[in-house]
Amino acid sequence: MSIFDDPFDADSRVNAGCICGQHQSPAEHEHAMLALRCEPVADSHEKRYENVVASAVLRAVFPEVTTRRAFLKTVGAATALAAVSQFFPLKTATEAFAEAGTPEKKDLKVGFIPITCATPIIMAAPLGFYSKAGLNVEVVKTAGWAVIRDKTINKEYDASHMLAPMPIAISLGLGAQPIPFTVPAIENINGQGITLAMKHKDKRNPKDWKGMKFAIPFDYSMHNYLLRYYLAEHGIDPDTDVQLRSVPPPEMVANLRADNIDGFLAPDNICQRAIYDGVGFLHVLSKEIWDGHPCCSFSASREFITTAPNSFAALTRAIVDATAYASKAENRKQIAEAIAPANYINAPVTVLEQVLTGTYADGLGGVKTDPKRVDFDPFPWQSFAVWMLTQMKRWGQIKGDVDYKSVAEQIYLATDTRKVMTDMGLTPPKDSYKSFSVMGKPFDPTKPDDYVASFKIKKAS
Amino acid sequence: MTASLRLRAAVVSIVLLAVFLGAWHIATRSTGTAANMSPEYAKLMGMTATQGKSAMPGPLDIGAKLWEHLRRPFYDNGPNDKGLGIQLAYSLGRVMLGYLIAVAIAIPLGFLIGMSPLMSKALDPFIQILKPISPLAWMPLALYTIKDSSLSAIFVIFICSVWPMLINTAFGVASVRKEWINVARTLEVGNIRRAFTVILPAAAPTILTGMRISIGIAWLVIVAAEMLVGGTGIGYFVWNEWNNLSITNVIIAILLIGVVGMVLDQMLARVSRLVTFPE
């Protein structure tokens, strides 16, 4: 039974089917599907909380379904609500519920890199999601992934925008000393692309890419793993046949113009900027490699969670709320305008709009539309972490055996986020693992070692 | 004669500037030929692609933007967007702090090295090895050990400005004329008094030359350091505008960095003229 069903609806049937059989009516099925994609169902979250609290109270007063229905039938939903609020302070309960413990620390600093992946983290400031959660958050623009890592480890930032594999790398001590980090929420799914220089207009087959130079934002990035995956599937060994360079995203466009690199796999606002300036064209969206892949994450150290659990919970709520807001297509234009100024991403509004609304110039003279070019979904699937670990192992970043499951579960906080989402009146997925396929090849999170072994091209270990 | 020379030099300077600006303006003019594309597509593209506008801004763009910045140098739109005046103040603050710490350490240490041949020989290898290290190479180490990015930036300024001052002070102190020291010794002047009344005035011009070199280096390095750590400062401004590929703002920042550097250098030149003496 969905958490969203209206307890004041006397006509709701106890047993009626929907397509999947789990819901009482097709409408409710639709409702649950929306919630699964974290699109907010009620108009505002106060309203949503109110529904959750009211339904809980009503259920407590009339535990029997039949009595509840009889009561509702005789007096009507509005009267019932009024009656209940007479002897139970619904308003106060809702407020107490929404607050869920005062934050230990109200003034927080959150670091971000100026790319569209950070949309929920950034927009939560100008659009007031942090203040709604009772926090005073300063979002600080940071120069690069290594700096954001160091500043978060040094506790200059309380939490940060990080590439989804970074918290795993930090926790495992790859490229830094091991410090337990966590991912309470994924930021965006999809929203990256392979951009090539204009001169490669006719070289659309990756098999012809031998000897080319590509830029990626960071070694521990989905960009690195996706580009390597894409190249390897086309028979190009990313370690020997091409050159991969770690280049900060803003410099990618300048390097492409200067002919220092042939292309890059980067966040969409960088791709779109290259197109906007007429120096490159979009080869494929990352969505075409793996639809629904995670990219960036919202990350905090384990220590922050233990020292300030309420602040952490409030922060997670704000991010989940902002992510839900960002996932709605009709809000995207407003978001593009909110995050374009120099204080945030610092890019032309047209570029950000093309990324967020999904109607974009492809650089070859065509206008394309793909509303899911970038999407936002906060749930930190642990299977994502397992996939990243398999790729770290495949490309030699991890040597030796990995306990995939326990690493994924310690870092990707699916259980905690599920609880936060449920408390907020959203319906998070019940499982923490799901299988998916990358370029048509299925991935089974229960058999990571077989998956690594199944690749022909990988770093010889 | 000198007046007319100065006048002629000024005229040549202005002509050179005018020629440079003219050439720049012509080189960056938009070609005006709109590329062949559908209006719907053109709306999604930048001026560079649609109107053949050069990626490099012209002098007029720069002038307009510079005026915009100069009109409101102290605006504050939040933690990541502040006016140029505020950014410069942050950078100058960092440079001054790091530089003053360097002065406080380099000059006494330089005295010690200059006055004692033993210490001079003993410390020489360390100085020789540490001196040529690029200050930015210290950055990762500083971030890792100090664990604070703004302190790290100050540390980098300190480490880059300490060497020229140290070496110049030691050299100036060591090369004070032997006769003057001997006269002081004959008059039975104590060590401390000798240092302050004989050696310090004699070595002051050399010490100030070292300080002048140091402030130049410190100002060079702060821009790079701030680009690395971000947050505030003129270096961060350059990085943030580079992020947006706004060459106009980058050029403005370059101009301002040059002007501030010149002012700092001239200030120390003034001071050093005060302490020079005719032999």
Image (cartoon, coloured by chain):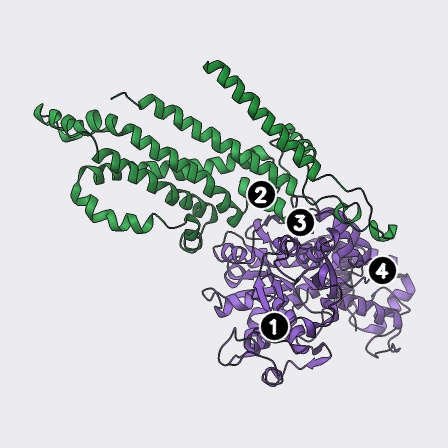
On screen, residue A144 above or below A402 = above
Instruction: Using the rendered image, report if marks 4 and 3 lie on a common chain.
Output: yes
Q: Position of residue A235 (x, y in %)?
A: 66, 78
Nearer the observer: mark 2 or 3; the answer is 2
Q: Chain of mark 2?
A: B
On screen, residue A296 above or below B80 = below
Residue A80: numbered disc: 4
- Residue located beneath label 1 in the image: A385
Nearer the observer: mark 1 or 3; the answer is 3
The answer to whether the residue labelled 4 contacts the one labelled 3, judged by CB atoms less than 8 Å apart, is no
- Dot 4 or dot 3: first in sequence order is 4
Q: Secondary structure at mark 3?
A: loop
Colour of the chain lettered A: purple
**Amino acid marked by disc 1:** Ala
Residue A345: numbered disc: 3
Q: CA distance from mark 2 to mark 3?
A: 14 Å
Please rate how many residues cluster around mark 2, counting C-alpha atoms within 10 Å: few if below 14, some from 14 to 19, many from 20: many
Nearer the observer: mark 1 or 2; the answer is 2
**Amino acid marked by disc 4:** Ala
Please rate how many residues cluster around mark 1, counting C-alpha atoms within 10 Å: few if below 14, some from 14 to 19, many from 20: many
